[in-house]
Image (tube, helix red, strand yellow):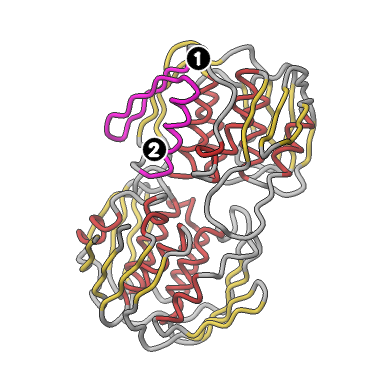
Amino acid sequence: MSKLVIEGGKPLCGTIPVHGSKNAVLPILAASVLCTKGVTVIQNCPDLKDVKSTIKILRYLGAKVKKDGHTITVDASGKLRHRVPKRMMQKLRSSIIFMGAITARNQKAKISAPGGCKLGARPIDLHKDALRALGCDITEKHGYIYVCGKNRKSVELSLRFPSVGATENMLLASCLTPGVTKIKNAACEPEIIDLADFLNTMGAKIIGAGTPEITVTGVNSLHGTEYAVMPDRIAAITYLCCAAATGGSICLTNTVPEHLETALSYLAQCGCQVEAEKDVIRLSAPKRLSAVPEIETSPYPGFPTDAQSLFLALLSTADGTSTIHERIFENRFKTADELSRMGADIEIKKDIATVCGKDHLTGAHVCACDLRGGAAMVIAALSAEGTTEIDNVCYIDRGYEALEQNLATLGASIKRM
């Protein structure tokens, strides 16, 4: 198993582009199974472990998939299977999105519960309830979920929580369902807009994506299209945090600054100079950051839970005391234990982390607990004195393309072993 070895204390400076969004490309790839006429050509696809796992699912279902650099072509016009083996489902969390896609395509589906990072309770009840509201019959036995969607009907449904995954499953299942379906209290994340835009280029009729109420008018079929995936906003925040933690200066290209407004405002509170225009973000950090009194995670447009671990590492060396309130996942402070190995002073009480900034962190042997936790350890290692070894790099590879190469371009001393 590989690990990252990082020699800290070097300010990061330079320009790098941001790769395509992990959280957007995975549901878009799942949506490609709805195309029965022609092929879908998806551009700006990041080269990630989760993308490779999703391609394996598509090929198992019977789709013909070709990957050429950052472009993936999917031909799903032939007959497709309706089931996904458990071993494939458990490779990643977003595999649950295939439930809505396969049901819409084949009128039935057989899947297991998804895998992914262990961030506490992540029930899929919202997904199942959404499909039941559409008229699907769902049963569970022997570790599998069986969905029968022959009697799907349009519906007006208000989600109990604005779940991104449940909203995506509703979009996928309803775009080929007769009538007009309304999804209220829908997730507003940019990735929802990207999925809806992709489906609309295939012939779907979806309006309101990006707002709490989405209207879907069912169509008979969807056709091939070409589409470019949005930039990865969490990867952008990660690189900004890497530069900020090291007192560096960075320019990110291929970004959508309005997707990052909340995180950018907190970076400004830390004392960073932040400039954004069109698709470019520039950040210049002071020698030492200032603490942020309070950060609270919440659904978009609030502060993203995926960035919580990143700021936990960032604020570990800020001047003063910061608090982070995690309101989305119940078990997302595991990274604090690893940061403490490097000298961080973090106190966890239920869903609140209190971070007392230290003058510096010290290199140590640590582990990536999950995807974003792994990125947080990289941020900490870059700012620390001495050498840090990070195990379980497989988590990081799920969401970051060429992380060490990009950081090395910015002046980091980092290598994979």
Q: Magenta stretch containing residue 61, yes or no?
A: yes
Q: Residue drawn at (50%, 37%), measured in percent from left and top? A: 88
- Which of the marked residues, 1 or 2, is nearer the chain's N terminus? 2
Q: What's the residue type where badge 1 is placed?
A: His
Q: Give the label on residue 289, or none.
A: none
Q: Residue drawn at (72%, 22%), measured in percent from left and top? A: 149
The spot of residue 291 in percent (x, y) is: 48, 81
Mark 1: secondary structure? strand
**Residue under pointer 2:** 52
Which residue is more in the foreground, 332 or 56?
Answer: 56
> Magenta residues?
48-77
Q: Magenta stretch containing residue 276, yes or no?
A: no
Q: Can you say which quadrant of the picture contains the C terminus?
A: bottom left
**Residue under pointer 1:** 223
The spot of residue 148 in percent (x, y) is: 73, 23
Q: Pointer 2: residues within 10 angstroms few (<14), some, or many (20+)?
A: some
The spot of residue 368 in percent (x, y) is: 42, 64
In the rendered view, does 367 fall on the left or right side of 115?
Answer: left
Tell which residue pokes out farthest to the front in this image. 142
Where 42 sits versus 46, above or below?
above
Mark pair 1, 2: CA separation: 24 Å
Dividing the picture into quarters, in which one does residue 295 lie? bottom right
Mark 2: secondary structure? helix
Disc nearest the viewer among 1 and 2: 2
Q: Can you say which quadrant of the picture contains the N terminus?
A: bottom left
Which residue is more in the foreground, 220 or 277?
Answer: 220
Q: What's the residue type where badge 2 is placed?
A: Lys
